């Protein structure tokens, strides 16, 4: 399965483009050739599926819709965009861990109940 990234491309002081790609480094070069200002790949977060990456991209676009300039471009400094993505990933990881712990607890309780 191919890794898909959510990326932040642009300038440190903004604006930034937040999207997904399997090759964010190539994407940055492509965007750079048509951009009126110098851009660089500022951040990329790997995901194991396009669906998962797309989910985080949509969430980011929804949360930061007031800063949208056009398409996937946002009037944000890079640090805020990156922090937004990292926070969403951290929260998602926390809930996954909590769900796994709950499943383990339920399994242990079920094993204990069958032993009695």
Image (tube, rainbow, N blue to C red):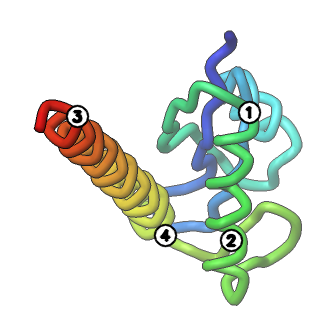
- State which quadrant residue 18 falls in: bottom right
- The front one of 102 and 3 is 102
Q: Which of marks 2 and 3 is nearer the N terminus?
A: 2
Q: Point out the image quarter for the N terminus.
A: top right
Q: Residue at x 52, y 30 (%)?
A: 46
Q: Mark 4 or mark 3: which comes first in sequence?
A: 4
Instruction: Look at the numbered discs 4 and 2 and tell me whether their residues touch, using CB distance below 8 Å.
Output: no
The residue beneath circle 2 is: 74
| Position above or below: 66 against 47 | below
Percent x, y of residue 4? 66, 27
- The mark closer to the camera, 4 or 3, is 3
Q: Distance between the residues labelled 2 and 1?
A: 22 Å
Which of the labelled discs sits on residue 77, or is there none?
A: 4
Label 1 or label 4, whichever lies nearer to me, is: 1
In the image, residue 37 above or below residue 73: above
Q: Where is residue 93 in the image (x, y as percent from the top left)?
A: 36, 48
Give residue 51's position: percent from left, percent from top.
74, 39
Q: Residue 50 carries which label?
A: 1
- Asked whether, in this view, residue 69 is left or right of residue 105, the answer is right
Q: Which badge, 3 or 1, comes first in the chain's sequence?
A: 1
* Measured Cα–Cα span from mark 4 to mark 3: 56 Å
Kindly report the distance in space between the C-alpha atoms of the residues bearing marks 3 and 1. Answer: 41 Å
- The mark that comes first in sequence, 1 or 4, is 1
Q: Which of marks 3 and 1 is in front?
A: 3
Q: In this view, does 27 lie to the left or right of 64?
A: right
Q: In this view, does 33 lie to the left or right of 100?
A: right
Q: Nearer the viewer, residue 38 or 22?
A: 22
Residue corresponding to mark 3: 114
First along the sequence among labels 2 and 1: 1
């Amino acid at each position: 399965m191919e890794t898909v990234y959510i990326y932040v491309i642009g300038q440190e002081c903004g604006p930034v483009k937040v999207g997904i790609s399997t090759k964010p480094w190539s994407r940055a070069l492509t965007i750079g050739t048509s951009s009126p200002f110098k851009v660089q790949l500022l951040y990329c977060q790997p995901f194991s599926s396009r669906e998962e990456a797309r989910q985080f991209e949509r969430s980011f676009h929804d949360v930061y819709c007031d800063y949208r300039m056009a398409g996937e471009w946002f009037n944000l400094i890079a640090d805020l965009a990156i922090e937004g993505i990292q926070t969403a990933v951290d929260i998602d990881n926390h809930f996954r861990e909590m769900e796994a712990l709950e499943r383990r607890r339920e399994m242990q309780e079920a094993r204990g109940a069958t032993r009695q």
